[in-house]
Amino acid sequence: MKSCDFKPNLVIHSNSIAKLLKRRDVEKLLEINAARRAPEMVTTKKYQSKFKGYYRIRRGDQFCKPYFKLLRHHLERKTKPALKAILFALHKKTNEWHLSFSSKLLATLDDSEPIYDRNVATMLCVPHGALKANRWAEQVEERMDLLKCRLKNIVSSSTWGQHEAAFNKAFPEASHLNSLRKADLMIWASY
């Protein structure tokens, strides 16, 4: 696994805020996260369509029904399981392993959790290929730890304050988001 000390080249582009505004990404994220206050909305087609469109989940009912049921379960109980617990719960119900989709479910429960997205992983030089069956759980943890570390490096950089101020000015309704989530959004828009 690559070192956390590695500093990727500039990953937040100057046009990331404009892209987020144009695509309404932050507005959509806040609408998705509104399920924290009203978990029953997770069962609606409107919510599921917005969630699947925003997070690019192109799976059938065999995957999506247990996925949204698990999301609602944790929203109603206001619980935040470990990422591995989500992965294994989804695998048990769907017979599929999805690090990215599991991280998106967890991030919907808690803004301080990063999303494992292939594009963001690429920009941060975090491995994103297939996981080896015999080291699957270990590699998931390594990748998420590296992703968190790289995001923390970005938000502790000397230029982060400028990026966060620009984000907060453009999206005052989202200024409460964790710095890691803001960085993740801006990096995602930069890809």
Image (cartoon, rainbow, N blue to C red):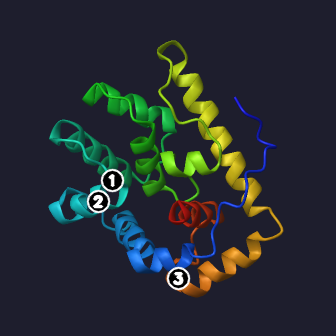
Q: Quadrant of residue 67?
A: top left
Question: Of helix, strand and loop, which one carries label 1?
Answer: loop
Label 3 environment density (alpha carbons within 10 Å; few <14, some 14–19, many ≥20): some
Identify residue type, mark 2.
Gly
Dot 3 corresponds to which residue? Answer: 171
* Residue at horizontal 55 percent and vertical 52 percent from the top: 120
Label 2 environment density (alpha carbons within 10 Å; few <14, some 14–19, many ≥20): few
Identify residue type, mark 1.
Arg
In the picture, measured across the screen, residue 71 lies left or right of residue 187, that is left
Residue 44 percent coordinates (x, y): 17, 61
Q: Quadrant of the N terminus?
A: top right
Q: Is residue 38 above or below residue 120?
A: below
* Mark whose residue sits in front, 1 or 3: 1
Dot 1 corresponds to which residue? Answer: 56
In the picture, measured across the screen, residue 28 lies left or right of residue 118, that is left
Residue nearer the viewer, 65 or 22 = 22
Sequence-wise first label, 2 or 3: 2
* Mark whose residue sits in front, 2 or 3: 2
| Residue 103 appearing in the image | yes
* Residue at horizontal 53 percent and vertical 82 percent from the top: 171
Residue 78 percent coordinates (x, y): 43, 54
Identify residue type, mark 3.
Phe
* Label 2–label 1 contact, CB within 8 A: yes
| Residue 40 appearing in the image | no
Q: CA distance from mark 1 to mark 3?
A: 23 Å
